[in-house]
Amino acid sequence: MVRLTMEFFEGNQVLFIGYSEKYQAFCKQVYQAFSNNGIKVYPVNNKDKGNFDVKVYKSLEDLPQIPRTAYVLLNRKSAGKAVKELAEKGVRRILFQNTKNADQSLLEECSRLGIETIVACPMMRFGTGFHKIHGFFAGVRK
């Protein structure tokens, strides 16, 4: 089993696939939690024309570089499409927010493509307060 450690974020970088205006407060929290832990974040959203306070890339082609780790906050159908593109671009590790984003068949597809996966809220590892307590009871350790 792969654990959610700093080593999971190869090169201390992460693609944030699905950074959205609809969930902007949560997206900001996750972005800040990653950043506060020394992880460079590349938010991507190809549909949202939101008014963001960080640079949000429209596509993977717009990125200055493609990290080998991604955090995916998309619905299951969109996550399935994203996995194929991420694999083609060299992503080798994906953190899915929860089982609403990644069912067993998608995790098996990732494995077939050589992608390590974790299903967990990153706030349990990198957040504070309630998130840390939730993480403790869920078995998330540093």
Image: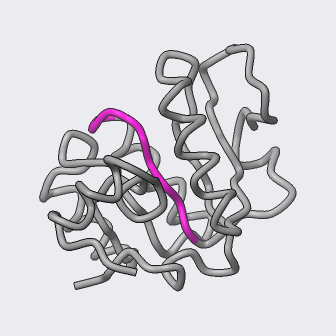
Query: Residue 87 at what x, y percent from top left?
Result: 50, 65
Taking the spot 47% from the left edge, 23% from the top edge, the residue there is: 23
* 99 vs 44: above or below: below
User: Is 109 on the left or on the right of 115, as rendered?
Assistant: left
Q: How many marks?
A: 0
Q: Position of residue 86 (x, y in %)?
A: 53, 58
Quarter-wise, where is residue 55 in the image? top right
**Residue 11 placement, left or right of 81:** right
Please state which of residues 120 and 59 is positioned toward the viewer in this rendering: 120
Image quadrant occupied by the N terminus:
bottom left
Q: Is residue 11 magenta?
A: no
Instruction: Determine the image quadrant of residue 112.
Output: bottom left
- Which of the image's four quarters has the C terminus? bottom left
Q: Residue furthest front?
A: 129
Relative height, residue 42 to residue 39 (above, below): above
Instruction: Decide whether residue 75 is among the magenta residues.
Output: yes
- What residue do we see at 69% from left, 80% from top? 11
Q: Position of residue 16 (x, y in %)?
A: 58, 48
Q: Residue at x 62, y 32 (%)?
A: 45
**The magenta segment:** 69-77
Q: Tell me, what colour scheme is on the image?
A: one colour
Q: Position of residue 84 (x, y in %)?
A: 45, 55
Residue in the image at 32% along x and 78% along y:
141
